[in-house]
Image: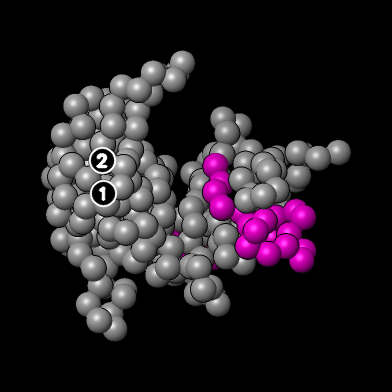
Amino acid sequence: HALQRFTRDGKLLLRIGKFGDQGNDDSTDRVGCPTDAWHDVSRREVYVTDGYTNHRVAVFNSDTGAFLRSWGAYGEKPRPAPEGKPRETFNNPVHAISLGPEGHLYICDRKNDRVQVFDAVGRQDAKFIREIELDRPSPFGTCFNLGFTPDGRFMVINDGNNSNLDVVDLAAWDYVDSFRPPHSDGIGMEGTVHKITTDARGDLLLARTSVGIIRLRYDGVGPIQFKDISRP
């Protein structure tokens, strides 16, 4: 239940939270199994998806650890879902956060099978912009995390439950393609793609539980343009 900041050689500089204490959606010095973070270096603010037990994005000063603000689904006050209405709030886990090409923050609400977008960087109030659902059978949720193509035109959503990668046209805000990562046939949750990220040239890196890392080369926009270059 902690977010930690280290030097490159492993010296602990800051810890937000306390091991064994998950806090709640109102906590100013606790986090509940945080899952991801994005650092606004210029403003010295770190945005944390919080998380497996709480239902919010929490923002802290990245130098002092001081709590600054938080928000829940649709930019509302974070809280547990009312009985029978799980989509009114972020579900557990609030699983990932990414900065989009236009400067908005993309939040993966995994068990609600959706990505929500906010104008929130440097703002005291997070303004909800839009959302997209990835609705398919998913006991563990579909929207694990996401990445963007280098030209900023497309978003790739990682459906870790079904070992699927879904491509969204950001301008049209609709799905345009879907493909399974290499070596996915017959693999279960023990080998799922849990996280994805892109490198400086746009290659897609897939972190697979119990399998390892697969790198897909980005060859530009077009059908099946990611190629596995991680294995001979």
Residue 137 in the image, given as x and y percentages of width and height = 55, 77
Label 1 and label 2: CA atoms lie apart by 8 Å
Residue where numbered disc 2 is placed:
17
Which scheme is used to colour this image of the protein?
A: one colour
Instruction: Answer left or right for 142 relative to 99.
Output: right
- The residue pinned by badge 1 equals 21
> Up-down: is 67 above or below 74?
above
Horizontal and vertical percent position of residue 21: 26, 49
Q: Residue at x 61, y 32 (%)?
A: 201
Q: In the picture, residue 112 is in which quadrant?
A: bottom left
Who's the residue at 23% across and 68% down the image?
80
**Left or right of 119, for residue 190:** right
Identify the magenta region: 171-197
Neighbours of disc 1 within 10 Å: few (<14), some (14-19), many (20+): few
- From the viewer's perspective, is residue 169 above or below residue 152? below
| Residue 50 visible within the image | no
Q: Residue at x 63, y 62 (%)?
A: 189
Question: Seen from this angle, which residue lies furthest right?
Answer: 232
Left or right: residue 62 compared with residue 99: left
Q: Mark 2: few, some, or many residues within 10 Å (few <14, many ≥20)?
A: many
Q: Quadrant of residue 100?
A: top left
The spot of residue 42 in percent (x, y) is 27, 25
